[in-house]
Image (spheres, coloured by chain):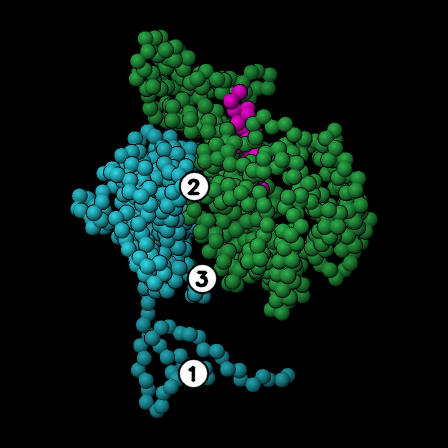
Chain colours: A green, B cyan
Amino acid sequence: MAVFVIRRLIVSFFILLASTFLIYTLVAVSGDPLGDLRADTSPNRQQKIDARIEKLHLDQSIPARYTIWISGAAKCAVPGLDCDLGEAKNGQDVSALLGTAVSSTLRLVAAATVLAILLGVSIGIISALRQYSGFDYSITLMAFLFFSLPIFWVAVLLKQYMAIQVNDWYRDPKVGLVTSLVLGALSALTWGAIIGGSAQRRWVVRGVAFVASVGALLAMSASGWFKFPALGPGLITVLSLGAAVGVAALVAGLVRRNVLYACLATAAVGCIAQFFVTPWLRDPKWASWTNLLALLVVAVAVAVAIGWALGGLDKGQAIRATVITAVVTGLVIVVDIALRTVNPYSRLVNGRIFATTGSETPNFSGTFWEGQLDLLTHLILPTIAIMLISFAGYSRFSRASMLEVMNADFVRTARSKGLTERTVIMRHAFRNALIPVTTLMAFDFGALLGGAVITETVFARRGMGSLFVTGLSQVDPNPVMGFYIVTAVSIVIFNMIADIGYAYLDPRIRLS
Amino acid sequence: MTTLPPQPITPEPGLPGTVPPDPVSGAPQGGGGVEREFTIRAMTQRQLVTRRFLRHRGAMIGLAVFVVVLVLANSAIGIFGLPGWWGESYQTTGEVVAGGRMTLDLLPSFADGDGVALGNHPFGQDNVGRDYFALTMRGAQISIVISLLVGLIATTLGVVVGALSGYFRGWVEGVLMRITDVFLTIPLLLIAAVVGKISGGGPVTLAFVLGLLVWVQLARLVRGEFLSLREKEFVEAARAMGASSARIIFRHILPNALGTIIVNATLTIAGAILLETALSFLSFGVQPPDTSLGRLISDYQQAFQTRPWLFWWPGVFIIAIALSVNFIGDGLRDAFDPKQTRVRA
């Protein structure tokens, strides 16, 4: 494994050299760097031209300029030395520009990747299990539509409909009867498709989902929940217990009760803990990412202990189930805190909760949670815009992969052994279907970065995308190379992780 | 040991044009005493594929939409100097009538009293009074031309390089793999924007340079196909009979790889449309005075609140073209798939 990693690193190093040289040369010849100065009519035109020639080394040949740049950039790899990525045309240091831009773009790309993978793979797998059903056809149609959408168009549409109109709606948030009925019908159809089974069971599920959704929407609208959203202890308890039952059903089935009891115990511990955790986290003195992470570690540790104690014969399976339940319960508690922050946050931003420009509100002064909510609301629309295409790709790919696995011999053997369908799918088919998806992750990352450039332009986020666009339009290689080196290194790292993950998941590769 | 009564064997659908044989006796059914003459119409691979493709509803709808858009765009404003049937030009500015509103009226007279009308400016007018229908048609024309050219160039290059590297292996394959690795670390939009800026913005040059970028993906796929096909027995047989490499590649391996090539060429075309419009949106693609659907959207994105039609129509056309090409590609993929037994409804 170590040899593999080192070999990949060396190869990647040379690939990076080649590609950076290629891009640098292309950007340098893409136009005249002195173009705007040649048209200048001020008296000190010649001095300006000379100053720029000296600063950007324009008197030297392109490979020489590239060598200057790469020797500066190589200093970045050595921890002790200062990073010298050159200067932009207006004199700003590129590494300083990058510092602020990278966090914004990385948030965007990370959120989009995680969401696209989670949603895409789960919907793809469900779609494969319900092949040729109405759900499958509608998901396929949706995937085709998303493949054909231009990201920039979708981004502007989102700006209008999800941001401006939702903000207008939020001034007096009420859900009408017709809207509730339509949303309830959609929810009923989705739940019926997800929880499959006999036709009778699906209709029961649809009915319950419809009534519950319509009732919930009307209640939320009438009670003004949208203005002061919160989950409350009751709902948290219901959600976490429901999640416990769901996770136990998926992982181990509900017949042997060991795992079910272990998950319920974990959820119960979480529900009791919320009375201590929520006020503690909401206190501005204690709210921070490190504390959240510490809580996560504690929760996982408690879950492992409960799983081990109550797990019965297969402790590994029980521990997996309880850890997932603990994470979901933690997520529910965090969502509750975030929802409670919406009201004070909206007062700070005058009711326009969905932002359309920038990556955060300028001069924002609020508590930790309000700051995080601010980042989130600025993140949500660009993430949706980028994620649509990736989601379509993942769902199609995991659907195809799952179908291939379900037709494989080992699944037929498992079924003929008499295993329940749930065991066959979750224990055998699911894991094997996931293996090819790791290869897709590596390809998709580059496409996501391209999408990030476009959405940053549309939503006016100050990220690496805008560095690239302004740099290229002004024939300024240094910011473009700054953008490129960060993206190339992250793509290489991501590819390597995907390859290692692929080798880890597929024993046939490891042993060959 | 119990013996089961003879079960009726469900007759195979059989080849088209035949009468299914009687399950027990094997003779053709429906006959009386006279032997019925029946012909088995064997279908060639090409006929089978065409038949499956023509039966694919999604692909047929996609084909219809694509042809409609193609004909509409090219006939409305003319091509290669031939005039079109649409009177307004996309370049003449003029007076903005009624705020540049759309004059297209699809509601018949019993709905709003005006009747169905096309009007002078069915898609409205832009800021300086140019007719938006002509602009959109011109943009669609350019986008389609660029994407078709990109598909052509990428397919040709990709097939040639992929075939050579897959069949001969050796240094050609090594070079191709290194080039592919380098391209993998570069986001496509990034390098497309850079070369788009270099190319200057004429549609044909842009198509050319984009084609030079996109062929890598196709070459990898063709190489994979060739790698697996060259191990087949018929290649060994051909070689044993003394066939030259060129003959083996073109007469034996390439026709078998054609399915993958055609499907991926179609998907490349769909991707090329989205790439070109995205580049034009970022203003690194088609430059003025020529227009592209992406440029139109970029120019008028601020106008969305007041004159949404300036924004909707180019987007609708992009989606229509890309979606129809994607459906055609999917239909082709299903048609070429030998394991496809269920006819897509």
Q: Nearer the viewer, residue A457 or A257?
A: A457
Q: Give the Cα distance between marks 1 and 3.
A: 27 Å
> Label 3 near label 2: C-beta < 8 Å?
no
Q: Nearer the viewer, residue B15 or B130?
A: B130
Find numbered disc 2 in the image and state the secondary structure of the residue it sits on.
loop
Q: Position of residue B179 (x, y in %)?
A: 41, 35
Residue A406 shows in this picture: no
Seen in the picture, residue B328 relative to A94 is either above or below; the reply is: below
Lower sequence index among marks 1 and 3:
1
**Same chain letter for marks 1 and 3:** yes
Closer mark to the observer between disc 2 and disc 1: 2
Lower sequence index among marks 2 and 1:
1
Task: Tell which subunit mark 2 falls on.
Answer: B
Find numbered disc 3 in the image and state the secondary structure of the residue it sits on.
loop
Main secondary structure found in the magenta portion: helix
Residue under the point 65% across and 39% down: A343
**Could you say which disc has been placed on residue B339 in the image?**
3
Q: Position of residue A304 (x, y in %)?
A: 77, 44
Q: Which residue is mark 1?
A: B22
**Could you say which disc has been placed on residue B305 in the image?**
2
Q: Give the Cα distance between marks 2 and 3.
A: 50 Å
Task: Tell which subunit mark 3 falls on.
Answer: B
Residue under the point 33% across and 75% down: B17
Residue under the point 70% across and 31% down: A288
| Magenta-colored span | A96-116
Q: Give the Cα distance between marks 2 and 1.
A: 70 Å
Residue under the point 66% across and 44% down: A229
